[in-house]
Amino acid sequence: MKILVDGDACPVKNIVIETAKKYNLKVLIFINESQELDSDYAKIIRVSSGKDVADFELINQSETNDIVASNDYGVLTMALAKRAFPINFDGVIFTELNINTFLMNRYLNEKSRKAKKYVKGPSKRKNEDNLKFEEVLNYLILKNITEEI
């Protein structure tokens, strides 16, 4: 098991790294070549600036039972198809039971934007969001560790 992170605009990189250290888990953070990021623990994977290049590289390196952290529903859907554990930056675990709802909401929001209708953006991130993400990440790691035994 490893943790793969869609690193562009990711507010939880440090939480992932600190949590992974506790369990001695490998962390791969995928970023666009124009981004700057260094880590003494995580492996930083820089990819070219093309559309979805980082997303596809992340998915190509993911495996069953890995944890994939992203806010991109496409990435989370592909991770689910690979039998990984997809989690968004708010700590929501994506499953076969809820993925279609998220994809439909994305579709409807995109349709509204194209029709020039106002679509409310995400609210400002709070410390509670970080705490929830950390709690759910720990849950996924422990669940995965106990099921491997």
Image (spheres, rainbow, N blue to C red):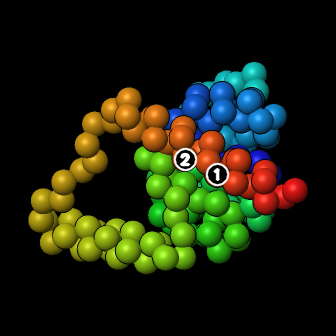
Label 1, on which residue? 140
Report if the CB atoms under discs 2 and 1 are less than 8 Å apart.
yes
Between residue 49 and residue 4, name the one nearer to us: 4
Q: Describe the element under mark 2 as helix, strand or loop.
A: helix
In the rendered image, residue 93, in percent from the top left (x then y), is placed at 52, 59
From the viewer's perspective, tell me whether residue 103 is left or right of residue 52: left
Q: CA distance from mark 2 to mark 1?
A: 6 Å
Which label number is shown at residue 136?
2
Residue at image coords 45%, 35%: 130
**Crowding near the residue tagged with mark 1, few <14, some 14–19, many ≥20 C-alpha atoms within 10 Å:** some
In the rendered image, residue 32, in percent from the top left (x then y), is placed at 59, 42
Residue at image coords 50%, 42%: 133
In the rendered image, residue 110, in percent from the top left (x then y), is placed at 28, 69
In the rendered image, residue 136, in percent from the top left (x then y), is placed at 54, 47
Q: What quarter of the picture does the C terminus occupy?
A: bottom right
Residue 107 visible, this angle? yes
- The amino acid type found where label 2 is placed reads Val
